[in-house]
Image (cartoon, helix red, strand yellow):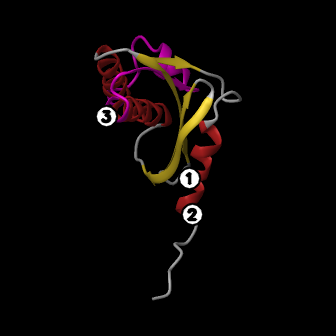
Amino acid sequence: MRECLVIYVDAALDKNGRAGCGLAVFVRGRAVYTESFGFSHLGGSAQLEAHVCAGALDLAAARWPYHRVIVRTDCAPVVRSRMPSSDSFRIAVHEVRERCRRGWRVVRYVSRKANPAHELAREGLKSLSRPPVLAAA
């Protein structure tokens, strides 16, 4: 088994259903991959964070299949929830737990201040409010 990847994730949601996602992958304390993007989301913020965690676990399985993985989120309900409150959140948390069972993968809590993906999520959200740049032919 190879070394451990730490994947920091965060999501930002505005009142208009626009969401931003941030992801930062670290190996031995060094960032090896970062990404931010925006999209539409109709559910709640905890559900969104759970989906982002599940997506990070899928990315790790596809891109780094032989590494141990720790996904770190600043959304405590995703990590600590025993009985999620809504059906949609329950399904999203179940997806995260199922992906953790497949290998050397865990999801842990990290404070917002210590989460490098926090600013990336905000950037992803801002990308939706900027007009697209058109290139001249």
Q: Is residue 109 visible?
A: yes
For residue 62, the mark is: 3
Distance, label 3 to label 1, CA atoms, is 25 Å
Farthest-out residue, bottom: 137
For residue 125, the mark is: 1
Q: Are discs 3 and 1 less than 8 Å apart at CB? A: no
Q: Give yes or no for residue 110 being in the magenta stretch.
A: no
Q: Nearer the viewer, residue 29 or 109?
A: 29
Q: Nearer the viewer, residue 29 or 96?
A: 29
For residue 129, the mark is: 2
SS for callout 2: helix
Q: Are discs 2 and 1 less than 8 Å apart at CB? A: yes
User: Percent x, y for residue 124?
Assistant: 55, 52
- Point out the stretch of residues depicted in magenta: 61-88
Q: Amino acid at mark 2?
A: Ser
SS for callout 3: helix
Residue 18 lies, with reference to residue 60, above or below; the image says below
Quarter of image, res 121:
top right
Q: Amino acid at mark 1?
A: Leu
Q: Nearer the viewer, residue 105 or 40?
A: 105
Count of marks, rendered view? 3
User: Percent x, y for residue 55?
Assistant: 38, 35
Mark closest to the chain's N terminus, 3 or 1: 3
User: Percent x, y for residue 108?
Assistant: 52, 17
Q: Amino acid at mark 3?
A: Ala
Q: Nearer the viewer, residue 14 or 93?
A: 93
